[in-house]
Image: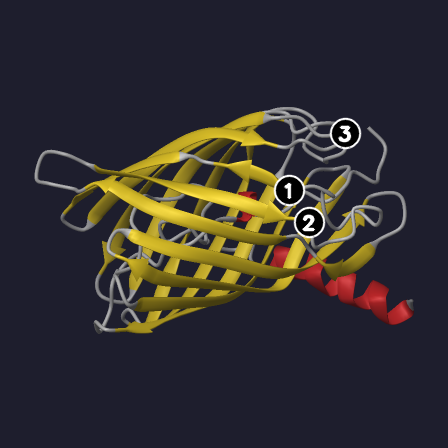
Amino acid sequence: MKRSNCICEFVGALAVLVSVPTSALAGPPFQTDDPEPIDFGNYEFYTFAASDGTPVETDAIGPAFEFNWGALPNVHLHMIVPAAAVLPANGPRAFGLGDIELGIKYRFVQETKHRPMIGTFTMFEIPAGSAKRGLGVGKTWYKAPVWAQKSFGPWTTYGGGEMTLVNAPGYRNFPFAGWLVQRDFGKKVTLGTEVFYHGPEGLAAPQTRPATLVDVGGYYKFRNPGFQLLFCYGHTVVGQTENYAYLGLYWTWGKKSGNKPDNPTGASFDGMAQPVFMGPT
């Protein structure tokens, strides 16, 4: 029990470490995602930790492992297997396997000089985590957002949103939307900022009221694009007080030397299973 508490405290402390400047690439490390799949025949792998918390409770994942595969042209398959921690302000803490995330990203409109690319990233959260301990929702839940993206030289902007569908006791369906602007600074550094909104997620989640966050983060390329550091931190500007943080490492390989030199792809922290609410309202 003592060792379990130490692990949970470490995951929570990691969120504080990344509070100094990060969502993503398009996608990680940000909460807003993009419509661009990885190239056909290419692969991506992430190892990361992330947290999302209110004064009532902080939910964290880490270590977590994400894998993306360019299975077809304009399509990639996605999976995240996380360790999860539930850290309520009052009440017992829990640590263990979280819900497993599966997804399919599909780009159905290509970018041109005057037209943005458009795509969707359908995700399924598989109930692998213990709902009784607050490490999972207990049922499969879904989201199918639509994202759009346009690039202008060193600048890239993307965003979109949709509804999250959670058919589980204590939770409710809720909307989410985000928009991000990022810029390349030379070959090594990309920095960006996003505005991200989500509706109330239900009394079983810490996010019982709507919130709009501003997140700042980016990527440092040890090898461009093969090996990168991802980082992000954000805080509420309107609505329920909430803090978001992400820190991870990213690798890519495959048929080409690189598919997205400045923007790895993947799901953001908002795609993880929302642990069961354990603290007071």
Q: Which corner quadrant holds the C terminus?
A: top right
Residue at 83% in and 40% down: 278
Residue at image position (76%, 33%) is: 204
Q: Does the residue at mark 1 contact the one at mark 2 (Cβ under 8 Å)?
A: yes
Whichever of labels 1 and 2 marks the residue nearer the N terminus, that label is 2
Q: Quadrant of residue 114?
A: top left
Disc 2 residue type (three-letter): Pro
Residue 136 at x, y percent in the picture? 72, 47
Name the residue that disc number 1 marks.
140
Tell me where residue 77 appears, x and y as whole percent.
Answer: 41, 56
Would residue 274 be found to the left or right of residue 265 on screen?
right
Which tag is nearer the camera, tag 1 or tag 3? 1
Q: Is residue 223 above or below residue 278?
A: below
Give the labeled residue for mark 3.
170
Q: Which mark is residue 127?
A: 2
Mark 3 nearby-residue class (10 Å; few <14, some 14–19, many ≥20)? some
Drawn side of residue 12 relative to residue 176, left or right: right
Crowdedness near tag 2: few (<14), some (14–19) or many (≥20) residues, C-alpha within 10 Å: some
Mark 1 vs mark 2, CA separation in Å: 6 Å
Kind of residue at badge 3 = Gly
Q: Residues within 10 Å of mark 1 (few under 14, many from 20)?
A: some
Which residue occupies 72% across, 65% down?
A: 10
Could you tell me which secondary element the residue under label 1 belongs to?
loop
Cα distance in 3D space between marks 1 and 3: 14 Å
9 sits left or right of 108 in the view: right
Looking at the rendered image, the disc whose residue lies closer to the viewer, 3 or 2, is: 2
**x%, y% of residue 237?**
54, 29
Percent position (x, y) of residue 131?
A: 79, 46
How far separated are the C-alphas under marks 3 and 2? Answer: 15 Å
Look at 26% across and 49% down and name the residue there. Answer: 183
Q: Residue extending furthest left?
A: 113
